[in-house]
Amino acid sequence: MSQGELLVGAGALLVLLGELLFGLLVDEYFIGQFSWAVAAVALLAVALRAMGRTLPGYDTILVLAGFVMAVVGVRDLVFDLRALGNYEAVDFLGMLAYYVGVVAMAAGALMVWRKRPA
């Protein structure tokens, strides 16, 4: 597996674990269903590849998942910055997990996209 694939998978895992910890268990910072679903699809694709199986259009799935998360992440960042004064300290930890995961997914997607032939 390439570094880009691993970065997309690690970012997706961070997004999902952050949601599990801060969204479901602590009940503080939620990311939304769409972001969760995109991260889950990316993580599933990477996990299947790690087990020796490949989905049709695997590279396309990773690139689209990373780029979609980048767009959604920017939108979420704008909303989070608007409501910055309403958050507690634990919300910022949830935000950190989410945004680091989004950046990792986007960077990994860019790496996967650049290695594809034109």
Image (tube, rainbow, N blue to C red):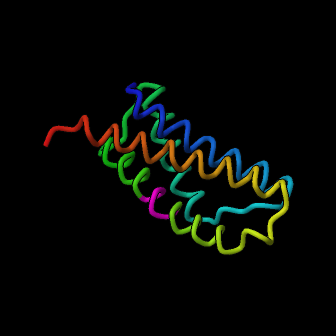
Indicate the quadrant where residue 82 lies: bottom right
Q: Is residue 91 above or below residue 51?
A: below
Spot occupied by residue 29 in the image (x, y as percentages of width and height): 76, 61
Q: Is residue 7 left or right of residue 16?
A: left
- The kind of secondary structure the magenta stretch mainly shows is helix
Closer to us: 47 or 26: 26
The quarter of the displayed image where residue 2 is located: top left
> Seen from this angle, which residue lies furthest left?
118
Expressed as whole percent of the image width and height from the top left, the position of residue 61 reads 37, 49
Bounds of the magenta segment: 68-72
Would you say residue 70 sits in the magenta stretch?
A: yes
Residue 14, horizontal then vertical, whole percent: 63, 42
User: Is 37 colored magenta in this rendering?
Assistant: no
Give the left or right position of residue 50, taking residue 36 as reference.
Answer: left
Residue at 66% over, 62% down: 31
At x 38% / y 44%, what residue is drawn?
A: 109
Q: Quadrant of the C terminus?
A: top left
- Relative placement, left or right, of 55 versus 78 is left
